[in-house]
Image (tube, helix red, strand yellow):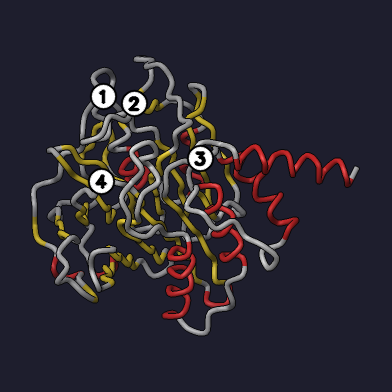
Amino acid sequence: MKSLKYAFLSTLAAFFLLQPVADACTRVLHVFKEKNLVVTGRNMDWYVRYPSTFWKFPRGMQRSGLTKTNPAKWTSKYGSLVLVQTTMGQSAATDGMNEKGLVANLLYLAETEYPKRDASKFGLTTSVYVQYLLDNFATVKEAVDALSKDEVQIVPVPIPKIDKPSTLHISISDATGDSAIIEFLHGKTVIHHSRDYDVMTNSPIFEKQLALYEYWEEIGGNTFLPGTRRSADRFVRAKYYNKMLPKAKNYREAVAAVLSVLRNASSPFGDPDPNKPNISKTLWRIIHDQTNLISFYESTVSPNVVWVKMKTLDFSQNAPVQMLDVDNANLSGNVTKQFKNSDPIQYAKP
């Protein structure tokens, strides 16, 4: 039986190694039990650099799912700090954390197959999906329970500047260290929910990523690790290095530890292959401290890391919406006081 298992896993690994090269993004969750600290970070890798802004949204905002028919409507229960990507007048929430420590990360997944639009269900565009999660849920379990009812249907919005649909999947984590991966496969919502799901990249689908990691775990990271920019290779490396992180001696070391795993899974600058445009350079990294509600942001074209302390922001109902242009290379350190009042951003519609 053992030999059959190794044969199966070897065949499985060979299958993945022959798959088309996929896009790039990496998400890592780590719980530092010795510091009672939960940290989630992600790389954004893409071949088009979209302008990035931080947005502070208070509680009590009226929201819409933005679909043409039967859009979901809600009032935000929680304030949030959201990273928004904008180009050609089209904006989407790609990452963020709410005041309860729930984090949502949007990543690309080529295998995504959204359901055909069922107007009897509330519609929710891909551009506002992260915002919906942050507005409504304090924990991963709350979000999973709500999404499992299948009352809300996701509707894709095209990705600006490129001829590609927004085929996406989402990771969520909370201040307790709980985690879930949400995918849309064969017209259905598929949810993987476990505290063990601490790493996510892109293709293949998450179920196959777990099977692939099982193969590499048998080999052992001290013997050999796959080193390319491919999504499956980054998944294996991030899992291994995240598992090997030592106990943090202090807070600074804890944040730096997760950042070190993300940097290992990053892609350097280079001209994208026109036949494989999704293998791309890392544009930015973000680290969310879900215990102390601090978000760290690092642009790969800036020499500085900046951070925002959410506990000093005003998330009360009727507080002003505020924004900060994080593409400004002159920013450094604590930028919490540099947010400016603004009209709410308009997310992209279908």
N-term-proximal mark, 4 vs 1? 4
In front of the other: label 2 or label 4?
Answer: 4
Q: Which residue is mark 1?
A: 67
Which amino acid lies under the numbered mark 4 shown in the image of this protein?
A: Val
Q: Marks 2 and 3: in contact by CB < 8 Å?
A: no
Circle 3 crowding by C-alpha within 10 Å: few under 14, some 14–19, many from 20: many
Q: Position of residue 308 (x, y in %)?
A: 26, 68
N-term-proximal mark, 1 vs 3? 1
Which amino acid lies under the numbered mark 3 shown in the image of this protein?
A: Ser
Whether residue 166 can be seen here = yes
Q: CA distance from mark 4 to mark 1?
A: 26 Å
N-term-proximal mark, 3 vs 2? 2
Circle 2 crowding by C-alpha within 10 Å: few under 14, some 14–19, many from 20: many
Q: Which residue is mark 4?
A: 48
Q: Marks 2 and 1: in contact by CB < 8 Å?
A: yes
N-term-proximal mark, 1 vs 2? 1
Q: Which residue is mark 3?
A: 203
Q: Position of residue 172 (x, y in %)?
A: 45, 49
Q: Secondary structure at mark 3?
A: loop
Q: Residue at x 60, y 42 (%)?
A: 17
Q: Which residue is mark 2?
A: 155
In front of the other: label 1 or label 3?
Answer: 3
Q: CA distance from mark 2 to mark 4?
A: 23 Å
Q: Marks 4 and 2: in contact by CB < 8 Å?
A: no
